[in-house]
Image (cartoon, coloured by chain):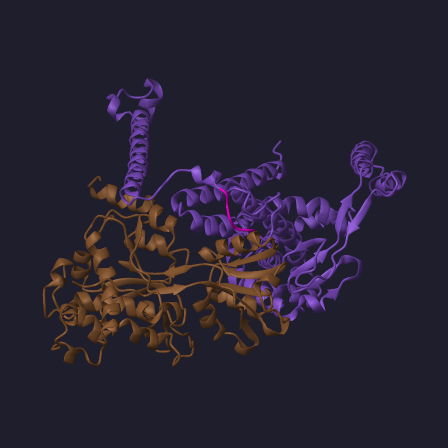
Chain colours: A purple, B brown
Amino acid sequence: MALQDVSRNAGPPKVAFFNDPKIRGWAYQIVLLAIVVYIVVVGLENMFANLRAAHIASGFGFLEDTAGFSVSQALIPYTQGDSTYLDVYLVGLLNTLLVSIIGIVCATILGFIVGVCRLSRNFLVRGVASVYVEVFRNIPLLLHIFIWYFGVLRLLPSPRDSVSLGVFGLLNNRGMFVPRPVFGALSWIPILAFVVGIVASMVLLRRAKAHQMRTGERRPIGKWVAALVLGLPIVAFFIAGLPLSFDLPKLGTFRPTGGTTVLPELISLFLALASYTAAFIAEIVRAGILSVSTGQTEAAYSLGLRPRTTLRLVVIPQALRVIIPPLTSQYLNLTKNSSLAVAIAYPDLVSVFAGTALNQTGQAVEILMMTMLTYLAISLITSAGMNWYNAKMSLAER
Amino acid sequence: MKKTLLTAVVSAAVVFGYGLQAATAATLDDVKKKGYLQCGVSQGLPGFSSTDDKGNWSGIDVAFCRAVASAIFNDPQKVKFTPLSAKERFTALQSGDIDLLARNTTWTMSRDTQLGLNFSVVNYFDGQGFMVRKDMNISSAKQLSGASVCVNTGTTTELNLADYFRSNNMDYELVAFEKSDEVVKAYDAGRCDVYTTDKSGLYAQRLKMKDPDNNVILPETISQEPLGPVVRQGDDQWLNIVKWTHYAQLEAELYGVNSKNVDKMKSSDNPKIQRILGQEGDFGTDIGLDKDWAYNIIKDVGNYGEVFAENLGPKTELKIDRGQNALWTNGGLQYGMPIR
């Protein structure tokens, strides 16, 4: 067309600068930014004005005040009456991270198993997996938590009639009381041996792989890896003179004393989060596997790969590209859902910091802002990690 | 304060409801304009504020809200109740969502001075106690070292508990729940050895347990828990109305004026009664109400003794005796300021 010819030959037509789309674009961006900044500044200003007008003390000085309450589970040293509100924040944060991380790990494993089972040719396996998914993802999470908590709590005996788990400790309605390892002075030796074993077997694996790529031969190194990872630390453990003993829980007047307590709140919150999220992950995994066309499997089979190898080398790597992005959302959901802990007294960030600490200090704005920023940071870090993994797994375009 | 509409909307959002109709506004005018009193109460504590199966509220905190409504509107029904958790209660009042907080709230210095709120009066003198199962054979709180304690989070209870165990050199495990229903359920399910809250609360919650008689309340009272209604700081007129509502009910009890005889008492010769009932002087005008304000309270809701007997007293399921909440003339702590 004529118009196109003109522009191609004569370069962009001359327009007034305020009609230039580039400059306009910038101008819109600047105006928008100014509005956003204005809103935020005025909002904050107004908030502080209102807080002052309402005679509400503000600021972050309260973080250094002593918190007068105790917390049932602290991963860092916490003493009631000495520790500050900042410690409370850290204790809550670590408890949130603890339940989120073990929840994510177990939900992923369970989700993958159920997802693969959903595609099984065995009717029973497929049926059980389908029922699992439908039951777990269609009931609100809070109910799951209550069922695990109050349901299981009522079934467990009182401390006086504790169930003995033999060497694994005691179980009663105050939680699971497991032996606590007490490390001797020389215990660094087996730990070092373990690290050495892992590094050595990684080198071994890498070389075996390179060998296979070069020659097509597979080296049987399984035995060597097992010897390095398990054998070496055990030998070192004996050489160092058994530097490990256990502090066993004993029955007391109320709770058992000694050992390490795994709170029933932690157990039930973990079970609820993991089983609930696993149902969603199972569906994601199923979708991912189905997204790999059967032609790929057939091609692998005709090359002579066994079903297992096909799954591991052909199907899963391609499925992961579909699986990882929605999986990230599930991880974020699980972390955020862990704040439902507040319903069953698990001392997570929301419960101890945005709950108890907020009430004791009355610093609602500061505490809620800190809590929100913390969740935001956890989520962003999780996404960043998963995006990195996704980029690594993505199709290498040649 | 800025006035543009945009600013108002945005800042309301930014500060989570610390709205612009801040503390200095005249609450009484707002309430009159709305035509009802918005009262924050607990989510369900028998004797203080709870609903029956038809959704009717009752309890002494509820009665207090109704008394204030009577003083303003001569109609105890012109109240809307907002059930609040321990955690939400102060924010709801600060933000102006409610006009009055009557939610068995303990009067402490930090709450009175740091939150932009004012405590008005004490409508129930309480103290924290412990409940344990009978079969544990415990007779004193001093035997509780090492126990697991169920408690409602965000209350003074949590801190008193910590102080008590620390000062007695005892160890404990804290199990803190957000809602009191969950505290009771967890204690009832055996998660804890001890349940602690204000003693009035222990009596009330015991009724909800599957075997109420298997639970005993230990003799120790470990704290002072003066419970009372709270208003926003900076509105003295409103504070006066709330304060004098309570005093009017106490004074009425002291001089034997109750909901049944109040009309007859109007013609009493006693000048003190005449002043309470608006027959002499005009005390209502000074607090922004009419001269029948106290008459309306007594007529519609009753005096303090009547409210107590109806909601907490020996004839109710709770069976709490007056104790510290008797009038000062009977050895209690309830002391009405003279209306003159």
Relative to B306, B294 lies left or right: left
Q: Residue furthest top?
A: A10
Relative to B27, B93 lies left or right: right
Residue A28 pos. (x, y %): 30, 31
Q: Is residue A285 above or below residue A13?
A: below
**Quadrant of the rendering where the C terminus of chain B is positioned:** bottom left
Using the rendered view, name the quadrant where residue B314 is placed: bottom left
Q: Is residue B16 visible?
A: no
Q: Is residue A1 visible?
A: yes
Q: Is residue B288 above or below residue A381?
A: below
Residue found 19% across the figure and 41% down from its top: B3
Please state the extent of the stretch shown in magenta in the rendering. A66-71
**Quadrant of the rendering where the N terminus of chain B is positioned:** top left
Of residues B171 and B183, the one drawn nearer to the viewer in this rendering: B171
Of residues A176 and A22, the one drawn nearer to the viewer in this rendering: A176
Q: Is residue A61 above or below residue B127?
A: above
Q: How many marks?
A: 0
Residue B140 pos. (x, y %): 58, 66
Using the rendered view, name the quadrant where residue B78 is placed: bottom left
Residue found 24% across the figure and 60% down from its top: B242
Of residues B204 and A283, the one drawn nearer to the viewer in this rendering: B204
Predominant secondary structure, magenta span: loop
Relative to B297, A281 lies left or right: right
Residue A297 pos. (x, y %): 70, 50
Of residues A287 and B106, the one drawn nearer to the viewer in this rendering: B106
**Does the magenta segment cover residue B240?**
no
Residue B56 pos. (x, y %): 32, 75
Relative to A307, B83 lies left or right: left
